Image (spheres, helix red, strand yellow):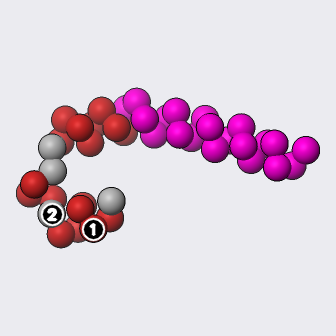
Amino acid sequence: MRERFVHHYGDMNLEIIFDTALNDIPKLNEFIQKELKNIDN
């Protein structure tokens, strides 16, 4: 993804990026937090 942001930012769909940031990243964070708690147990 870094490659796209750095070198191809003119070709990126900002609506998709915004949707990903708003919807997918919080879900991913929640999943990761749950998995990290499972590792400690």
Q: Relative to 5, is 38 on the left or the right?
A: right
Q: Relative to 12, is 29 on the left or the right?
A: right
Q: Which amino acid does label 2 sit on?
A: His
The answer to whether residue 28 is magenta is yes
Q: Of the two numbered discs 2 and 1 on the same chain, state the one appearing first in sequence.
A: 1
Residue at point 23% right, 62% down? 4
Q: Relative to 41, is 34 on the left or the right?
A: left
**Picture coordinates of residue 35 (x, y %)?**
72, 43
Asked if marks 2 and 1 touch (Cβ < 8 Å), the reply is yes
Residue found at the far right of this picture: 41
Residue 8, disc: 2
Dominant secondary structure of the residues highlighted in magenta in the image = helix
Circle 1 SS class = helix
The answer to whether residue 31 is magenta is yes
Residue at point 52% right, 33% down? 27
Residue at point 56% right, 41% down? 29
**Picture coordinates of residue 37 (x, y %)?**
79, 42
Q: What stretch is highlighted in magenta?
A: 22-41
Residue at point 81% right, 42% down? 38
**Picture coordinates of residue 1 (x, y %)?**
33, 59
Q: Which amino acid does label 1 sit on?
A: Glu
Q: Mark 1 points at which residue?
A: 3
Circle 2 SS class = loop
- Residue 8 occupies which quadrant of the picture? bottom left
20 versus 4 height, above or below: above
**Picture coordinates of residue 9 (x, y %)?**
15, 59
Residue found at the far left of this picture: 10
Quarter holding the C terminus is: top right
